[in-house]
Amino acid sequence: MAESKLLNLQDAIKRYIPSGSSLVIGATLETMIPFAAGHEIIRQGKKNLTLIGPISDILFDQLIGAGCVSSVKAAWVGNVITGSGYNFRRGVENGSITVEDHSNLTITMALRAGAMGLPFMPTLTALGGDLYKTNTGIKEIDCPFTGRKLTAVASINPDVAVIHVQRSDEHGNAHAWGNFGIAREACLASEKIILTAEEIVETEFIKRDPNRVITPGFRVSAVVHAPWGAHPSPAPGFYNRDHEFFLEYREFSKNRESFRNWLETWVTPVRNSGDYRKILGAGRMDSLKIKNHMLSEGVDYGY
Amino acid sequence: MAESKLLNLQDAIKRYIPSGSSLVIGATLETMIPFAAGHEIIRQGKKNLTLIGPISDILFDQLIGAGCVSSVKAAWVGNVITGSGYNFRRGVENGSITVEDHSNLTITMALRAGAMGLPFMPTLTALGGDLYKTNTGIKEIDCPFTGRKLTAVASINPDVAVIHVQRSDEHGNAHAWGNFGIAREACLASEKIILTAEEIVETEFIKRDPNRVITPGFRVSAVVHAPWGAHPSPAPGFYNRDHEFFLEYREFSKNRESFRNWLETWVTPVRNSGDYRKILGAGRMDSLKIKNHMLSEGVDYGY
Amino acid sequence: MDTDIAGFNMRQVMVSAASAEIKNGEVVFVGMRLPMLAFFLAKSLHAADAVGLYELGIARDSVAPMPLMTMGDLPNLSGSLWLADTGDMMGLLQRGLVDASFIGGAQVDRFGNLNTSYVRDKNGKVTRLPGSGGACDLASLGKRHIIIMSHEKHRFVERVDYLTSPGYGTGVEWRKEKGLTGGGPSAVITTLGVLRFDIKTGEMYLASTHPGVTVEDVLKNTGWSLKISDTLSVTRAPGREEIDILKNLDPGGFWTGN
Amino acid sequence: MDTDIAGFNMRQVMVSAASAEIKNGEVVFVGMRLPMLAFFLAKSLHAADAVGLYELGIARDSVAPMPLMTMGDLPNLSGSLWLADTGDMMGLLQRGLVDASFIGGAQVDRFGNLNTSYVRDKNGKVTRLPGSGGACDLASLGKRHIIIMSHEKHRFVERVDYLTSPGYGTGVEWRKEKGLTGGGPSAVITTLGVLRFDIKTGEMYLASTHPGVTVEDVLKNTGWSLKISDTLSVTRAPGREEIDILKNLDPGGFWTGN
């Protein structure tokens, strides 16, 4: 088996996400958002990133507020339980970021096209709507068989997909479970893949359940051990959503100054996941842990 | 929860597969082919079926030989380990069946389009080839964004998908594992779904692992308890491939008469899966059973 | 209206009215926030066999075992029917298999077109909103969709500044002309009443006012001359049982107040 | 040649030659039958880090724990890297991520075009063959593909009766004109020798004859005036270790004889 792809978070981000990269991150919508990786991108002061995703909850807002982003291709940017993302709003309104507006379906099809190596895919959504005005990757076409009107969506092949998973081996063979959002097509569409994982396990462990593998490991560039790496979003099998965190973030992100304070609490002083967990605190972590377990039955892949 | 969809095999086929239906069956390519359901179709003397699938191993050949089929939309029809399907060959050569020639990718995209409610999907395959001559569902188009040449594949929405699964509840919530072929898109594309299952289990058992569910149960029309229902193809977790069966079939299918003898041994006298297992015999079944077990680890869907 | 006197508040009336839009056995595309509660309320009352789809890749046929703040909370994954891709849920929608979808809105117009992307104030200043999410898809492709939003004059406008999610466009023929397959909006449930659409014109009209709300309240908060139903009624007030269920679904009152 | 004397037979030479086409670390789309053995042989010898993709939805980086008759045998699923959809494997292929693909053929022509669909005899009688399977896709989209087939005059024809899987069409520019993204065939491994393609013309030439086979044997069994390489060699004979591995992979000799 080829050499290990295990890197610490700093090295993974340094090596694979240069400023100017296009990045799909938070592809699972509300769960398993790679916040730890996003915060490291902020600490390394990356610039001119293009963020790609459906609904990223507050991670896009944080990256925009930290000045890392010049462009967004997304269906929705905000704070799921409270509404607006204030940094996003300021960024668009003061012209520091540009937006290619998508719906969940158009961004799905853009990445599915990218994943399949196709220049476009058709859909039936958005006909007659104004997504056509703010997205040059959308065109009306006629079906070659039926003549009916369709929306063609141009493919997107991001430079990097950053995906949080439950467990990975050091070669990028990883198990994920829960809802998948557009994570599977995001991996296949991207040139490089960085996995952050709650646990690092032996390859044999992964091979005992090949149906749970999220993407072929040979396409993965880096694997990072990042326990609590999706906090405050939920990680099935590990921890629940930290609603308070999102409510607090809403208040802090309302203006630039308090957002800077927020960064100085949660992002700037963190060197590794141990630091982050210390700030989070054992009590809060305990309260978020899975308490009502529901274990799946094993299945047999024997012969 | 709505009423049970559990039917015996006879009633399921009688109710949901009238003569003239278009049918996707054997969508997992070499594994989990619903032979028991196919044999019941033969016993009920269905006519003018359209068979849709990628590589169905010998099931298509059997249905053609039994006179049930008028048309085939497939990438490959034969006997995987021996080559030609003799009934298929005779059927095409004497004009009793027509063929829409596909590749694995064009049939995949035709069903993916059907699954997504789209009239077509593009691919890059088959350009310059003769699939264009024998498939009216394939057209060359220009990409609306890049101008490059593409193959547009018209969608297929079969009347019925017949899918073999490892376990289902009585409402059609079912777990499948192993390779999936084009079974997932076949279910989503079809108007009706018949599941044949090695085991019938409680709903709670299925809900303990929603990632293994092959298709949403509310779209399933009938669930049939069919142990050994994929024999002689393999069923992960249950039994291995019965190679001898395929070798014997090759010999019997070489001419019409011996094929009729084959039907009279394996199909005609069978009223239920018990009959079939009796013909198969305990020794043969023992030799096919899983002996080297490889159990997956449970995962936690708790909160 | 005071909750202490009436036994319910406007948010609860809205969720109750939304749940009444769901019929038993239907496949419902459940949107963020209030629709989440409406779906579980309907399942607890009159629509035990309804199935909910969630854009992040969940299909579910039971009330979550714990109150949810959002659809991605782990209790909403636990014991679900199917955990899959966003594209799988969108495929069911585009395939015409979704009976009813729920969408929130920031700005709506006479023909039920929704804007959740960009609004412009009187001075021309543009405010950026979160965007479509799945709303454009639900409005384009569902058999019918129900809009839930706050009833304020600057939100109920003659014409949306940006058409994120199509209603009836400029009139009832518009959807067909554009090639849209979904049926269009069937109701707008607001903080003041329930509005429906004239099938002949595609124009919104007031169908019922919530208990204690007058027609004048509604007209004052609507930016065009809104038509009123000949059979205008009062929105059904949620009963004691309904309120109890809602309190169990939202015990902190985050979505529906206390 | 007699196996008892030489220590190997032609089928074994073919599998050995096919395995030599696989480089370490490559992603290989493994076809039915002989390529299955060639992939495992390569992994056992010089390409330990190669990954195999199988059209039925399997990715695998290790030799199966038991001999296989076909790719769908459970030992080929057990301990694999990824069990997924046919479309996932085809996506990797179409995306340009597959280095080498293997295809069997019934009829091939001067430019490496393959027919596995319909053949016509001298009297015009059409025989129906099984069809493309994934072959058209592998030939259209892989970076390069390798054809494995029996070398007989009625199979090596001037022009295929039906073009199932594209080679270089009518010449080396043809693929680009048609819009094909894959590189085209790089080798044809037959029962008599190994043939390759002139990069200037796209035409097939004889690169090596198998041990004991003469150029005349090859020409006699080829339906056009086949060009011969200036550096024609003899195909490397499989060594003792290789034969032992092959016998373990195919103990019954179903694919490679005894």
Image (cartoon, coloured by chain):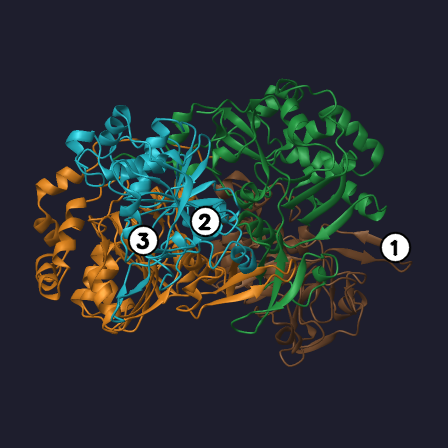
Chain colours: A orange, B green, C cyan, D brown
The tag earlier along the polypeptide, 3 or 2, is: 2
Q: In front: B134, or C46? A: C46
The C terminus of chain C sits in image quarter: top left
Q: Which mark is residue C222?
A: 3
Q: Estimate the spatial distance between the alpha carbons at disc 2 and disc 1, rounded to whole Å.
A: 49 Å
Q: Residue D125 carries which label?
A: 1
Q: In front: C257, or B175? A: C257
On the question of residue A260 being in view, the answer is yes
* SS category of the residue bearing label 3: loop
Q: Do discs 3 and 2 belong to a common subunit?
A: yes
Q: Which residue lies furthest to the right in this view?
A: D123
Picture coordinates of residue C165, whole percent (x, y): 41, 56
Q: In front: C211, or D226? A: C211
Q: Which amino acid does label 3 sit on?
A: Thr
Q: Estimate the spatial distance between the alpha carbons at disc 3 and disc 1, rounded to whole Å.
A: 77 Å
Picture coordinates of residue D24, whole percent (x, y): 45, 62
- The residue to which callout 2 is attached is C90
Q: Estimate the spatial distance between the alpha carbons at disc 3 and disc 2, rounded to whole Å.
A: 33 Å
* SS category of the residue bearing label 1: loop
Residue lying at 35% horizontally and 38% vertically, measured from the top left: C18
Task: Give the chain of mark 1.
Answer: D
Q: Quadrant of residue B35?
A: top right
Picture coordinates of residue D127, whole percent (x, y): 82, 52
On the question of residue D31 being in view, the answer is no
Q: What residue type is labelled 2?
A: Met
